[in-house]
Amino acid sequence: MDEFSAGFTGRLKRAVTGSPDTPLVFLGNFEVEEVWAQGEHTLPRFSGASGNAVVNRMDEFALLLAGEGDHVVLKTAPDEAYLAYLAELGLGLPAVHAVARQDSQRNVTEDVLHDPALLATLTELAGQGAHLTAHGISVVEEELSRRTGMPLAAPGAGLCKAVNSKIYSRRAADELGLRQPAGWTCETVDELGEALGRARELLAEGRRTVVKEAFGVSGKGIVVLENERRMDRVLRMVTQRVERSGQPRIAFVVEEWVPNQGDLNYQFTVGRDQSVHFDFVKRAVTEGGVHKGHRIPAQLSESRLAALREAAALLGKRLAADGYIGVVGVDALLDDADGVFPVIEINARNNMSTYQVRLQERLVGPGRAGLARHYPLRLNGPIGFEEMRRVLGPLLLTEAGGSGLVINNYATVNAGGQERPGEPFDGRLYGIVVADSATELTALDEGVTARLVAEGVSRAH
């Protein structure tokens, strides 16, 4: 089956509930890793972290993963003009339920738990046979399931957390004989000291290494071990935190930062019947180790694609044996020859690319090119979708088969304005640029960037 095989949402439903007709309630609780990481030791932070307001509004991506007959719960109701735009594209949309009072620092699930009326609505949907699905399952989603009686269309939080750990990824790859960079798992301070000793040997050979938190996400929870002084500092600070806490168990991975030709993300789905379906592979666009988007298609050689499919089959069988069901995203690397490192880390949750599948099925398709990315904005005040439509002009895609930018999340545009009303703020415009060729794709992407700058809603980069 090709990369853009139709009916992903139906296949997902069959995999996690046993039937393609089960109504699902979707939650976009992005950065669920923050919940999984609670109680875990962390690495020292050598740079500042950004706020949560924009990240929490990534919940609106779930609007385009759910289909007709499904439901999506959002922090606020979508812009009506944006919903009209999606309908214009011929996209069947789910019923939307918005929380009564959202907190920009809470994710969508936490908001729902503070909304008695919405909890009652979800309880009614549970009585009608609906199942709950989310970006990832943590104890917060388990609590929502308990309070509404709505069964999870997913494994429990404990298994999801365990599978998402980078320690699980390395051990599974070792067990299955899958190629990965040199590295070591660390669950005690002594193991971390031993791993850093091996990292010193790699450093002496001119090879780079990093240490990662087992539940780090989006470029956070990772430290480049660029010299021995940095290694000493990391070990000292982790040791001090362990001693202060009285909690001896840690969860880190130390591994070589291998030279590569690019990042890949591939996805497969594990069913209740232990079947494994390879969904797609995409070439990731990253900056400074932080995910920025995907190129579609990945344009891989047959040998590289075969290696990824084989890895997905092996990993899927391994995960199924552990009781896991649902979407699995795996980060991989292209090497300097014609090979791959097929397992850098396993993500037991949805991925950014998961939310692009329905749009691909309808608007990209075989023989066309796509670029999923976001455009950084700098706004003086909230901007409605109709105004953004005017700003983009003919560069906005408005019909299937056309070329241009299709917007797949509008909530993130204005989310930052809630932090300091009346002051300039940063936002993100997410979308997929669709074109008939790579050349046209590049021209459209550059055109969107230039137009946003010219219209005064983005800064030149």
Image: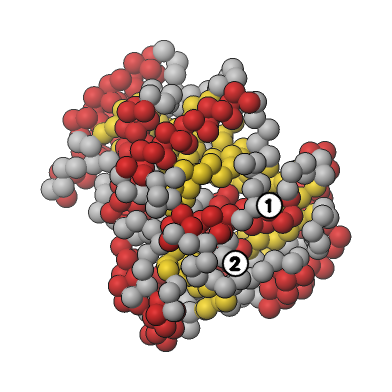
Q: Which corner quadrant holds the N terminus?
A: top right
Q: At numbered mark 2, what does the secondary structure look like: helix, strand or loop?
A: loop
Earlier-in-chain disc, 2 versus 1: 2
Query: Which residue: 72% across, 56% down?
Result: 362
Residue 302: image location, x then y, percent: 63, 26
Q: At numbered mark 1, what does the secondary structure look like: helix, strand or loop?
A: helix
Q: Which mark is residue 67?
A: 2
**Up-down relation of residue 176 to residue 81 (above or below):** above
* Residue type for callout 2: Gly
Residue 54 or 179: which is nearer the viewer?
179
Q: Is residue 7 left or right of residue 315?
A: right
Q: Are marks 2 and 1 in contact (CB under 8 Å)?
A: no
Q: In the displayed image of the protein, which residue is found farthest to the right?
A: 394
Residue 48 or 125: which is nearer the viewer?
125
Q: Which residue is mark 1?
A: 360
Residue 108: image location, x then y, percent: 45, 69
Q: Is residue 111 left or right of residue 432?
A: left
Query: Which residue: 39% across, 80% down?
Result: 127
Residue 82: image location, x then y, percent: 70, 72
The quarter of the picture where residue 291 lies is top right
* Residue type for callout 1: Gln
Q: CA distance from mark 2 to mark 1?
A: 14 Å
Query: Which residue: 32% across, 28% down?
Result: 175
